[in-house]
Image (spheres, rainbow, N blue to C red):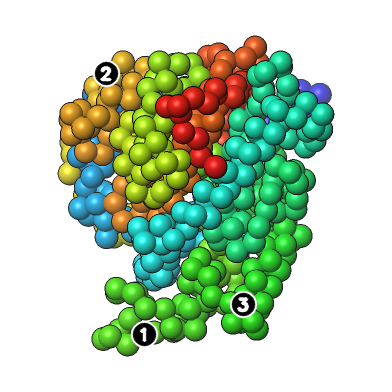
């Protein structure tokens, strides 16, 4: 009896020791390098609170940042993976701009083999393949291309406000599929649902060349698919984190972020669009057209796939094209919508700021007799201030990373040499909420971005779209579609707080998206037209 107990105790101890060694085998990385770091726990490292949904993603990033106060950088463990957290703006500038060639890649656990429509997208590409694709796509996001797409996006904005106005005025109208309720003369609207329908329609027309009306046709396939593929909560958040924990294990288990059915939907949509355009000779200045040109080797552009002045033909498969369009959907569907519903919430909570912005919109529209133009939108300074401050408080990207590709010594104390494969975090949300850079950081104050004040913002402390050559390629597009929506909405409606409005905002702990549980409910009240009020449409 005693002998069997001794054997059982020994076996239990041996198993425990093996599990402990397996769970901590990389967790001496920073102590060996004499780098300040947080004490990890087996298997989880320092991401346990996030993986177990104990904190929201922004709270997690802010906590890491604050715990390294007094240091220019520190070390944390993302499960088994050691990662450097950069805290000093000068250090961030060195890594993302000055010494960019040492940090050319983003870290992506999603391989092209396991998830081709994710792995082949611009965001996940590495090395020369990223350089070539970035160069290929850049012409799609120039000012001239934005201006040519302005009319298409404006039409989507008008479609949005016309629908809302009809909901208020037509009491017999049945509202199905959208999260909208009538409360007398106030329309209670879940703004995330509203704005993702708007951004969905914008992407459909400007990237795919198809027309969607996701308000009057709320259950259309394009919207339902886009909403699913951009939602990284629940089981998809677990799968996503699982790829960081062990990409090989996730591949072995055949865990997919994008199902075969979903992937085939996008492949069919893109390939059919290309076939139709080639067959009928349709030319449309959008992303698919540029990618078609690039695949044929006919795309012209500065340093764009050229060698000694000759155009080179990239070796692309059909999935390379589909992946870029899916990437555009992933980035554009949620990013602009996130900006819009946070901006709307902040304006409803600060009616004085909302009123000042409406005055600017009214005056601009009056000067152009109600016509909304590209130049007018980009000339509204207070609108830009409001949008910039919203992006400071609630950046769509809470955190970005960079992957070392060439040995690099961090120019800070303690000096530490990074080897190829080592990764760094750039904690955008935390930088935006650091009182050393933005006094009273939780206050919504657009004046931070006035002409008089914005020059005082320290470089690399405000990074809503990242920094350096790997910043967000679509930032200009996202800002334009957000500003168009705000102008059209505020020219015709007042934003109001309603009983279901979340006060204060609490970011969800259920996933990695910047959203709140229960939704962003606000009230819309139709503005009274008068001799000084011009409205779009």
Q: Which residue is mark 1?
A: 311
Q: Which residue is mark 3?
A: 277
Q: Position of residue 88 (x, y in %)?
A: 24, 34
- Residue at the (67%, 63%) spot, across then down: 266
Looking at marks 2 and 1 on the same chain, the residue that comes earlier in the sequence is marked by 1
Numbered-mark total? 3
Disc 1 crowd, CA 10 A, few/some/many (<14, 14-19, 20+): some
> Mark 2, mark 3: which one is toward the viewer?
3
- Secondary structure state at the residue bearing disc 2: loop
Residue in the foreground of this view, choosing between 132 and 25 = 132
Residue in the foreground of this view, choosing between 372 and 452 = 372
Q: Position of residue 480 (x, y in %)?
A: 43, 46
Q: Position of residue 145 (x, y in %)?
A: 41, 62
- Residue at the (39%, 50%) spot, across then down: 374
Query: In the visual, does 29 lie left or right of 255?
Result: left
Can I make out residue 163 in this image? yes
Would you say the residues marked 2 and 3 are in contact, meaning their CB atoms lie under 8 Å apart? no
Considering only vertical position in the picture, is 61 above or below 203? above
Q: Position of residue 493 (x, y in %)?
A: 55, 27
Q: CA distance from mark 2 to mark 1?
A: 51 Å
Considering only vertical position in the picture, is 155 above or below 208? above
Q: Which residue is mark 2?
A: 439
Disc 3 crowd, CA 10 A, few/some/many (<14, 14-19, 20+): some
Query: In the visual, does 266 lie left or right of 471?
Result: right
- Secondary structure state at the residue bearing disc 1: strand
Quadrant showing the C terminus:
top right
- Secondary structure state at the residue bearing disc 3: helix
């Amino acid at each position: 009896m005693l002998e069997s107990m001794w054997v059982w105790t020994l076996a239990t101890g041996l198993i425990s020791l093996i599990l402990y060694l397996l769970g901590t085998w990389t967790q001496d990385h920073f102590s060996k390098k004499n780098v300040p770091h947080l004490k990890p726990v087996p298997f989880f490292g320092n991401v346990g609170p996030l993986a177990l949904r104990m904190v929201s993603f922004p709270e997690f990033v802010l906590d890491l940042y604050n715990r390294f106060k007094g240091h220019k950088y520190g070390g944390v463990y993302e499960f088994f993976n050691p990662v450097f957290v950069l805290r000093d703006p000068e250090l961030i500038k060195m890594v993302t701009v000055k010494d960019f060639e040492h940090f050319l890649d983003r870290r992506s656990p999603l391989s092209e083999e396991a998830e081709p429509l994710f792995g082949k997208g611009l965001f996940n590409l590495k090395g020369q393949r990223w350089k070539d694709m970035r160069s290929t796509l850049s012409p799609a996001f120039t000012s001239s291309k934005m201006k040519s797409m302005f009319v298409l996006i404006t039409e989507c904005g008008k479609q949005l406000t016309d629908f809302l106005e009809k909901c208020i005025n037509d009491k017999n109208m049945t509202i199905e599929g959208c999260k909208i309720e009538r409360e007398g003369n106030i329309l209670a609207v879940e703004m995330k649902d509203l704005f993702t329908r708007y951004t969905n329609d914008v992407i459909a027309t400007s990237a795919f060349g198809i027309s969607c009306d996701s308000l009057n046709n709320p259950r259309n396939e394009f919207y339902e698919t886009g909403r699913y593929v951009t939602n990284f909560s629940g089981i998809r958040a677990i799968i996503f984190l699982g790829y960081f924990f062990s990409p090989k294990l996730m591949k072995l288990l055949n865990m997919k972020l994008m199902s075969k059915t979903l992937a085939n939907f996008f492949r069919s949509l893109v390939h059919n669009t290309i076939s139709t355009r080639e067959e009928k000779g349709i030319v449309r200045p959008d992303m698919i057209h540029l990618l078609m040109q690039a695949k044929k080797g006919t795309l012209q552009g500065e340093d764009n796939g050229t060698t000694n002045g000759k155009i080179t033909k990239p070796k692309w498969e059909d999935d390379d094209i589909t992946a870029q369009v899916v990437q555009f959907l992933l980035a554009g569907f949620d990013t602009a919508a996130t900006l819009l519903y946070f901006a709307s919430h902040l304006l409803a909570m600060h009616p004085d700021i909302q009123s000042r912005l409406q005055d600017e919109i009214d005056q601009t529209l009056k000067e152009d007799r109600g016509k909304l133009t590209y130049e007018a939108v980009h000339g509204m300074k207070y609108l830009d201030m409001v949008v910039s401050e919203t992006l400071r408080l609630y950046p769509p990207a809470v955190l970005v990373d960079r992957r070392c590709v060439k040995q690099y010594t961090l120019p800070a104390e303690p000096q530490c040499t990074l080897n190829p494969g080592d990764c760094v975090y750039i904690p955008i949300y935390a930088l935006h909420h650091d009182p050393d850079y933005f006094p009273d950081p939780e206050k919504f104050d657009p004046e931070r971005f006035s002409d008089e004040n914005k020059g005082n913002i320290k470089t690399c402390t405000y990074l809503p779209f990242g920094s350096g050559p790997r910043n967000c390629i679509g930032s200009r597009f996202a800002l334009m579609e957000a500003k168009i929506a705000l102008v059209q909405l505020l020219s015709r409606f007042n934003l109001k707080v309603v009983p279901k409005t979340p006060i204060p905002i609490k970011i969800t702990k259920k996933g990695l998206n910047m959203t709140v549980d229960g939704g962003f409910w606000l009230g819309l009240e139709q503005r009274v037209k008068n001799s000084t009020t011009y409205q779009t449409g």
